[in-house]
Image (spheres, rainbow, N blue to C red):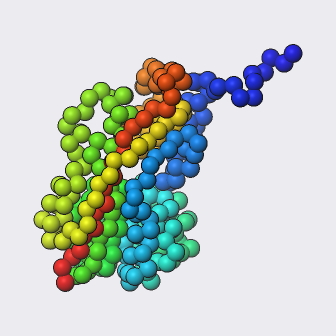
Amino acid sequence: MSSAPPRNAPRTFEELVAEAAAASVEGWDFSWLDGRATEQRPSWGYARMMADRMGRASAALDIQTGGGEVLASAPELPPLTVATEGWPPNIAKATALLHPRGVAVVADADEPPLPFADAAFDLVVSRHPVQAYWPEIARVLAPGGTYLSQEVGPASVFELVEYFLGPQPEARRGRDPERARAAAQAAGLEVVDLRTESLRTEFFDVGAVVYFLRKVVWMVPGFTVEAHLSRLRSLHEQIVSEGPFVATTTRFLIEARKPE
């Protein structure tokens, strides 16, 4: 009789963690999590909205493009399209993906100033920027130009963050969409759309958690398997006995225009 485990035997904690720790986290593609985690999507459809505006623009800038995947999904791009990115592995990935579409990818430190002239773009977009520098966005927008962004909202996935870090009351108050509105207006922009949604996220195994925290590095700063081994093991046991780990993702959409 074979001593091998059954074909559908549950995978061990060690197997799940080792696989996730070895997986590449370059770019902004989360397909590794297919079947292992789910995240409800906002109803507004950022990629569709972004593509619609790209098709009507003459010069566009995508700030913090990641691996360029979202920008590349637009069927039509303006004659002049530029993307910035600050993380070297993502710069290489975005360059390979976007250069064939005629997009210039600029290495940028994701802090002001943006390396572009005043009024250079009639469309600026950004999906999940680490921080929106509103005065710079306003500066590079041409009069009548539009800024469209989907941002991570307040206390997003904080059930997971606080599982590892404990209560974070100050951090929970960050990323307030009303603060974004005020900052945009202070920079001289008119906010024409602001929407917020709370969405359900589920992690079906501990490997999905490890991969997510390795990729979204600001959630649990300095995360490593070794430093959080005990909590990871407890989380594995919780998921096995109780089912998926459930968290709440928050997103907000903001669209602002620069007066003529």
Q: Quadrant of residue 2?
A: top right
Of 200 and 64, the residue lying toward us: 200
Residue drawn at x 36%, y 41% is: 248
- Vertically, is 99 above or below 260? above
- The image shows residue 238 at horizontal and vertical percentages of 48, 23
- Vertically, is 35 above or below 115? above
- The image shows residue 172 at horizontal and vertical percentages of 24, 39
Residue drawn at x 15%, y 66% is: 185
- Vertically, is 219 above or below 138? above
Q: Quadrant of residue 142?
A: bottom left
Residue 227 in the figure: left or right of residue 167? right
Q: Which quadrant of the figure contains the C terminus? A: bottom left
Q: Which quadrant of the figure contains the N terminus? A: top right
Is residue 135 visible in the rendered image? The answer is no
Is residue 189 visible in the rendered image? The answer is yes
Of 204 and 127, the residue lying toward us: 204
Outermost right residue:
1
Of 17 and 167, the residue lying toward us: 167
- The image shows residue 33 at horizontal and vertical percentages of 55, 44
Residue drawn at x 44%, y 65% is: 47
Residue drawn at x 53%, y 59% is: 93
Residue 168 in the figure: left or right of residue 187? right
- Number of numbered tags placed on the structure image: 0
Outermost left residue:
186
- Vertically, is 1 above or below 34? above
